[in-house]
């Protein structure tokens, strides 16, 4: 197993352990994603509506620290139910970009348009959102 580059400081949030494991395994299994991960710097807040909790992903350029609170203002804030958030992992990546023209991609677009998923800061930090999607995608 590769080095532990995902550190979970928010273990009291059950969702954090799932996300930490998924990310670490994804990066270990797909080394080409590591370059994108290494260039990802910033804070992403994930507001999990059904759990009424917020998880902060603090990307430090080659390391991710999951936190239950943070002093920095997030660059991106994703608001959705936990099941929908996990569904974001199934977006395919084609030609280095998220692919929204298959079933998984169309589902995400539909959820964005209906308000089931809200992503604050997505236009201001589009590059960060694209990198985040590449790293989180299990496809």
Image (cartoon, rainbow, N blue to C red):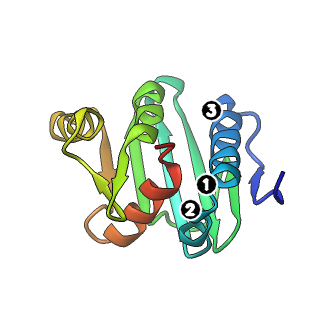
Q: Position of residue 36 (x, y in %)?
A: 53, 69
Q: Residue at x 44, y 30 (%)?
A: 49
Q: Residue at x 52, y 56 (%)?
A: 135
Please name the residue that numbered disc 3 is placed on.
Answer: 15
Q: Earlier in the sequence, mark 3 or mark 2?
A: 3
- Asked if the residues shown at circle 3 and circle 2 are in contact, with their CB atoms under 8 angstroms apart, the answer is no
Would you call the spot at circle 3 few (<14 residues within 10 Å), some (14-19), or many (20 or more)? some
In the picture, the disc for residue 30 is: 1
SS assignment at label 2: helix
User: In screen coordinates, is 95 left or right of 6?
Assistant: left
Q: Earlier in the sequence, mark 1 or mark 3?
A: 3
In the picture, the disc for residue 33 is: 2
User: In screen coordinates, is 94 left or right of 136?
Assistant: left
Q: Position of residue 62 (x, y in %)?
A: 68, 71
Q: Residue at x 70, y 40 (%)?
A: 21
Q: Residue at x 15, y 40 (%)?
A: 113
Cα distance between the residues tagged 1 and 3: 22 Å
Would you call the spot at circle 2 few (<14 residues within 10 Å), some (14-19), or many (20 or more)? some
Cα distance between the residues tagged 3 and 2: 22 Å
SS assignment at label 1: loop
Foreground pick, 118 / 139: 139
Foreground pick, 101 / 120: 101
Q: Position of residue 12 (x, y in %)?
A: 75, 33
The nearer-to-camera label among 1 and 3 is: 1
The nearer-to-camera label among 3 and 2 is: 2
């Amino acid at each position: 197993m590769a080095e532990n580059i995902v550190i979970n400081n928010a273990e009291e949030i059950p969702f954090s352990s799932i996300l930490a494991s998924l990310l670490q395994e994804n990066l270990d299994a797909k080394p080409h994603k590591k370059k994108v991960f290494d260039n990802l710097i910033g804070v992403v807040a994930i507001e999990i509506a059904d759990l009424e909790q917020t998880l902060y992903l603090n990307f430090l350029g080659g390391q991710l620290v999951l936190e239950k609170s943070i002093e920095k203002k997030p660059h991106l804030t994703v608001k959705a139910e936990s099941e929908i958030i996990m569904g974001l992992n199934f977006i395919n990546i084609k030609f280095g970009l998220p692919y929204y023209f298959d079933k998984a991609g169309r589902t995400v677009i539909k959820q964005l348009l209906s308000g089931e998923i809200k992503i604050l800061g997505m236009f201001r930090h589009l590059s960060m959102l694209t990198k985040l999607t590449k790293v989180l995608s299990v496809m």
